[in-house]
């Protein structure tokens, strides 16, 4: 079955419970007809419980209850046909089928309640994601940008990875980071760091000073909120970049974070040299502790920023995801297309489920002709 037909089947399954209800109704009819035609010592009416059980797999409690009532009516019809409606056997079958149908309807009600609760949780998670990780614009100055977040937790939208971008008077500054740990504490630290970056990115001319300011913010947060049992164990790896509008370069300060990949036309992938500094949260508030690396970033090239979740993702054999080799296939793709292809390839590598959150940001300096 091709992808189009499979998608059509899925849409029918999800959106047409009334159409699918024909299956258990037809099953009831078949069981009744066969039960009437077979010898008298063969009884198939007990199989009618299958009908409401099947209905519960795709429909709500009302339709399931209706099919259950129809099944009880079918048992009554069989008893009436054989002139045994009030016999002990038929009455017991009707009562048993009614009780089982009620139980199935009850579980449908519980399932629907959990489904509504899950929908509310998803809604809150999506709202939190937009507050914490504002979607980056498609274009900032001379740069095209796309971002991707893959949460490891089931049904989650956000976690401890983060990214942000903002404009200064003549450059674009970008942050990507990875909070140690998971859960609400990691999300809180990620929110703090993103907020601090948005507030202070415009106040410091140099990246080392900006890194020191972010470290001070982390120190204040950890002093007030870090659990005693985790004292000294919470930190954030981060990468700060400054991309000038006029100069085809990028300035970079690494804070325990892996360096970006530079994708150039012709399937070329290089890793800029990075003198890494301690992560945020370890007390390095001196700007001198945060060196700056400068590398060429000409028009037409793409910077690919990522967190550990992308490069440490393993397949069923335990092999890490080879991000540079895979990214080399699409060095000339637009940022959004590049991340779309990497997302599909990464999830295929891990079998559809990541063990850790992964964030990726692709930044392309638009050629002077706008292509």
Image (cartoon, rainbow, N blue to C red):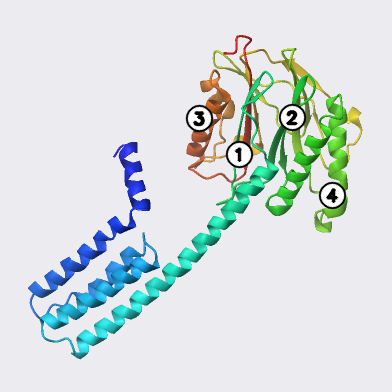
Determine which residue is flagged by label 4. Answer: 222
Residue 341, numbered circle = 3
- In this view, the mark in front (2 or 1): 2
Q: Nearer the viewer, residue 137 or 44?
A: 137
Q: Secondary structure at mark 4?
A: helix
Mark 1 vs 3, N-terminal side: 1
The mark nearer the N terminus, 4 or 2, is 2
Residue at position x 65%, y 37% in the image: 308
| Rendering quarter of residue 175 | top right
What residue did someone put label 1 on? 149
Res 312 seen here: no
Q: Residue at x 10, y 82 (%)?
A: 82
- Label for residue 166? 2
As measured in the structure, the alpha-carbon distance from the residue carrying label 4 to the one carrying label 2 is: 25 Å
For label 3, the SS is helix
User: Which mark sits nearer the N-terminus, 1 or 4?
Assistant: 1
The N terminus sits in image quarter: top left
Circle 3 packing at 10 Å, graded few (<14), some (14-19), many (20+), is some
Q: Residues within 10 Å of mark 1 (few under 14, many from 20)?
A: many
Quarter residue 106 falls in: bottom left
What distance separates the C-alpha of mark 1 from that of mark 4? Answer: 25 Å
- Between marks 3 and 4, how big is the CA–CA gap? 38 Å
* In the image, residue 130 above or below residue 79: above
Q: Earlier in the sequence, mark 2 or mark 1?
A: 1
Find residue 210 and report its horizontal and vertical position in percent.
85, 31
Mark 1 near mark 3, Cβ–Cβ under 8 Å?
A: no
Please state the horizontal and vertical placement of residue 329, each as a whole percent of the image: 51, 22
Q: Which of the two residues, 111 or 185, is positioned nearer the viewer here?
A: 111
> Marks 2 and 1, Cα distance to the nearest angstrom?
18 Å
């Amino acid at each position: 079955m091709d992808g189009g037909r499979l998608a059509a089947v899925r849409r029918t399954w999800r959106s047409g419970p009334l159409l699918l209800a024909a299956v258990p109704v037809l099953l009831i009819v078949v069981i009744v007809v066969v039960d009437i035609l077979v010898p008298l010592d063969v009884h198939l009416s007990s199989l009618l419980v299958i009908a409401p059980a099947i209905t519960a797999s795709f429909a709500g409690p009302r339709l399931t209850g209706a099919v259950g009532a129809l099944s009880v009516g079918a048992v009554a019809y069989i008893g009436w046909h054989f002139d045994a409606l009030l016999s002990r056997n038929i009455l017991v079958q009707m009562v048993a089928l009614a009780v089982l149908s009620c139980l199935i309807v009850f579980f449908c009600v519980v399932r629907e309640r959990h489904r509504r609760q899950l929908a509310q949780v998803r809604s809150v998670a999506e709202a939190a994601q937009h507050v914490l990780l504002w979607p980056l614009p498609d274009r900032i100055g001379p740069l095209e940008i796309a971002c991707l977040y893959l949460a490891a937790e089931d049904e989650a939208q956000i976690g401890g990875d983060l990214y942000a971008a903002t404009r200064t008077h003549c450059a674009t500054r970008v942050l990507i980071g990875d909070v140690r740990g998971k859960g609400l504490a990691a999300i809180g630290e990620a929110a703090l760091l993103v907020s601090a970056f948005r507030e202070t990115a415009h106040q410091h001319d140099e990246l080392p000073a900006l890194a020191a300011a972010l470290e001070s913010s982390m120190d204040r947060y950890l002093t007030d909120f870090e659990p005693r049992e985790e004292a000294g164990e919470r930190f954030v790896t981060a990468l700060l970049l400054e991309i000038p509008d006029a100069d085809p370069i990028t300035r970079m300060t690494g804070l325990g974070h892996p360096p970006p990949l530079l994708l150039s036309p012709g399937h070329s992938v290089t890793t800029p040299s990075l003198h890494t500094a301690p992560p945020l949260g370890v007390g390095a508030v001196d700007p001198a502790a945060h060196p700056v690396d400068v590398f060429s970033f000409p028009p037409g090239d793409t910077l690919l920023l990522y967190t550990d979740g992308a490069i440490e993702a393993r397949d069923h054999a335990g092999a890490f995801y080879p991000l540079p080799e895979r990214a080399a296939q699409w060095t000339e793709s637009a940022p959004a297309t590049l991340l779309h292809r990497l997302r599909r390839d990464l999830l295929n590598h891990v079998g559809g489920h990541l063990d850790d959150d992964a964030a990726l940001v692709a930044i392309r300096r638009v050629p002077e002709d706008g292509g």
